[in-house]
Amino acid sequence: QQQVKQSPQSLIVQKGGISIINCAYENTAFDYFPWYQQFPGKGPALLIAIRPDVSEKKEGRFTISFNKSAKQFSLHIMDSQPGDSATYFCAASGNYQLIWGAGTKLIIKP
Amino acid sequence: EAQVTQNPRYLITVTGKKLTVTCSQNMNHEYMSWYRQDPGLGLRQIYYSMNVEVTDKGDVPEGYKVSRKEKRNFPLILESPSPNQTSLYFCASSFGTGRDTEAFFGQGTRLTVV
């Protein structure tokens, strides 16, 4: 079964610190790797995404790092803020499927 | 406003009483899907539909039914709900599942089966 393994399950970071969430995939046919952000009481929403032909993508304080050979990608949140507290999901897309990681609950302490 | 609308937002029901959760999108998306979200298990796909009259099972389809008679609507039907179907449910839509495709989610339906 195709899987996307996400870690850690939960993460506590001090305000201003760097939050790092990791994901690993198995299927080399995946060609699109989005991250979704979910606030309590809301549905997930697309945060940032990357294609496997680039190693890094940055949007503001959010950066995806992608390692194709290791089949791993990660989300880095720089200067983490209390408003970033949410659940984050990685996903991998390909072969008409979108496979989700299990999610990471991120808490930013003021 | 582009959106996915689910109803109801909250539902408490008894074991065995049939229920339907509605989902409607106004973005003319072909692809729609239902997920359930449980602590520690992330988002698990129940059913998906690639277009009108085309539906297929996801990872956890047992106990659920869906239909896609119109492009905009994709209701989730629980014909005989059981307590293990207590969960948070999300409907999502997109133009597909390929590269650069963004999935839009509804607000969620919190279902409790007693």
Image: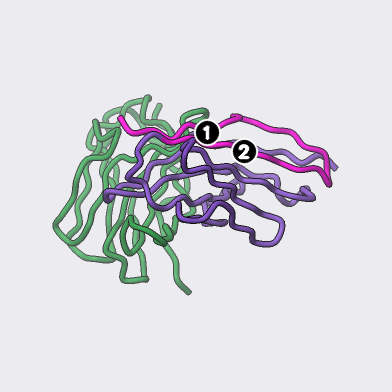
From this view, report whether residue A44 is shown above or below residue B78: below
| Residue corresponding to mark 2 | A21
Q: Residues within 10 Å of mark 2 (few under 14, many from 20)?
A: many
Q: Is residue A5 left or right of residue B54?
A: right
Q: Identify the residue at horizontal 83%, vertical 44% (top origin).
A: A15
Q: At label 2, which amino acid type do we have?
A: Ile
Look at the numbered disc 1 and give the secondary structure of its residue.
Answer: strand
Q: Colour of chain A?
A: purple
Q: Main secondary structure of the magenta part?
A: strand
The one of A49 and B105 positioned closer to us in this rendering: A49
Mark number for residue A46?
none
x, y percentage for residue B15?
A: 32, 27
x, y percentage for residue A40?
A: 61, 45
Q: Identify the residue at horizontal 23%, vertical 53% (top origin).
A: B49
Magenta-drawn stretch contains A5: yes
Whether pointer 1 and pointer 2 mark residues with C-beta atoms closer than 8 Å, the reply is: yes
Asked which quadrant contains residue B24, the reply is bottom left
Write down the region rendered in magenta: A1-25
Q: CA distance from mark 1 to mark 2?
A: 7 Å
